[in-house]
Amino acid sequence: MSEITSYTVHELKEKLDNKELTSEEITKAYINRINEKEKEVGAFVTLRTEEAEKEAKKIDIEGRTGTYAGIPIGIKDNLCTKGVKTTCSSKMLENFVSPYDATVVEKLNNEGIISLGKLNMDEFAMGSSTENSRFHITRNPWNLNTVPGGSSGGSAAAVAADLVPWALGSDTGGSIRQPASLCGVVGLKPTYGLVSRFGLVAFASSLDQVGPITKDVKDSAILLNIIAGHDEKDSTSANREKIDYTKSLEKDIKGLKIGVPKEFFGEGISEDVKEKLQEAIETYKALGAEIEEFSLDVAKYSLAAYYIIACAEASSNLGRFDGIRYGYRAEEFNSLKELYVNSRTEGFGDEVKRRIILGTYVLSSGFYDAYYKKAQKVRTYVSNEFEKAFSKYDVLLTPVSPTTAFEIGSKSNNPMEMYLADICTVSINIAGIPAISIPCGVDKKGMPVGMQLIGNKFEEEKILNAAYAFEQKIKFRENYKPEFKKN
């Protein structure tokens, strides 16, 4: 049974096509794995194993409709799912059951993909460690005393621990890529607008993007094929021609121009991470890619601009949780104002409150020009700098996270240190461009190191191609496996 859960999605599809496995056998294998390992990892908020088993049986009897029908998936708990709780790992939405499906969830359902449940996250996607969940901390399967990253920590940990073959996450400033890096899996943040945000509970609307977390690059391309596309329900959705992202994977990367921005390798990046990235650069040289170091001085400005823009949008978006229309309502209050105050005070966690306060401050009269307007100018500068870089290079190569997974509790009392964990990822969201995190080795403690490949807008094919060539060469999954250590 455990062998079934170690297969990639494309391997599972092959087994289903050849009638070597049934959907019920695959689903049961994952349910058994969840029963065995979920207590240690804590990846899920809501399980729907009974329903999943029934759906798998039905598919086996009635036949598969979609190409990937009968294969299970995990869904981050900020994506609306009809008839299933969507909590955003918050007390505010603890009992909220969505009356509709997010567009990406609808696409999975149309394909016949079976949801095993909703995955844990930092509350309202605010955090880099999945320690800010209302329900429980998720642990990294490589070492259970360390964080899986965030905010899509449940999604990354579930894929790494073989609790699901693939998962959906969301990325506002690195929330797919950073946990993918820390958990040794593949995480893709698509171009802003490529994947519909309809039904994604908003954190920062101009930065959020839904994307895949998978075991390998091919699965990432497959899931992107399923979820990408124009959606009339999302006004920021791009209307572009449909692309099959799996077709570009096996192209030769000889002559591919890879730029390495030296500022991303500066202060704060651990020696272990630098060493593994340097080895990755040598691998690309051996594959025939052209590597050049250059200057891209956006990281230090991006972090400050990101937290101003993200918090301002969060302050605005989270205004809807007022204790009246839906969500948590305080039991004790004597006036309308007190109902608002008490409901929000009791319903939101510390990190969410911190960001709402910061966002309200930067949007307030007298500070709007000094902070928010200036941050938007920085956003334009960052986008222009990336555009210049892509006039010269096909792909950019950087670290994902300054360090490998850190110990649970080691940064939770220091928000600034936690925010610095996003230094390599936030500029990509500010510019609205795509980036992928793929494992490139392990550090001296045996913890995975992620490499980030960044592409120009709507050039996912290039970064998937570069990632696939590298993955085939180093064969990370064949050489390293999570050990569920507890030291």
Image (cartoon, rainbow, N blue to C red):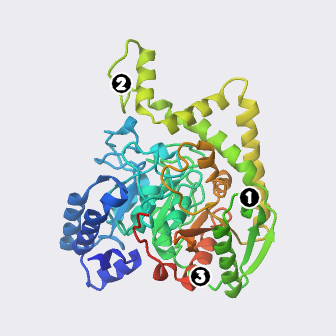
Q: Residue at x 66, y 26 (%)?
A: 364
* Figure check: 317 above or below 220: above
Q: Residue at x 22, y 71 (%)?
A: 24
Residue 379, visible in the rendered structure: yes
Q: Position of residue 222 (x, y in %)?
A: 46, 71
> Which comes sooner in the sequence, label 2 or label 1?
1
SS category of the residue bearing label 3: helix
Q: Residue at x 26, y 85 (%)?
A: 20
Residue type highlighted by circle 1: Glu
- Closer to the eye: label 2 or 3: 2
Q: CA distance from mark 3 to mark 1?
A: 30 Å
Mark 1 nearby-residue class (10 Å; few <14, some 14–19, many ≥20): few
Left/right placement of residue 218 relative to residue 297 reads left
Residue 116, visible in the rendered structure: no
SS category of the residue bearing label 2: loop
Residue type highlighted by circle 2: Ala
Between residue 80 and residue 291, name the one nearer to us: 291
Q: Position of residue 151 (x, y in %)?
A: 50, 52
- Which residue lies under the disc numbered 1? 267
- Which residue lies under the disc numbered 2? 330
**Rendered-image quadrant of the C terminus:** bottom left
SS category of the residue bearing label 1: loop
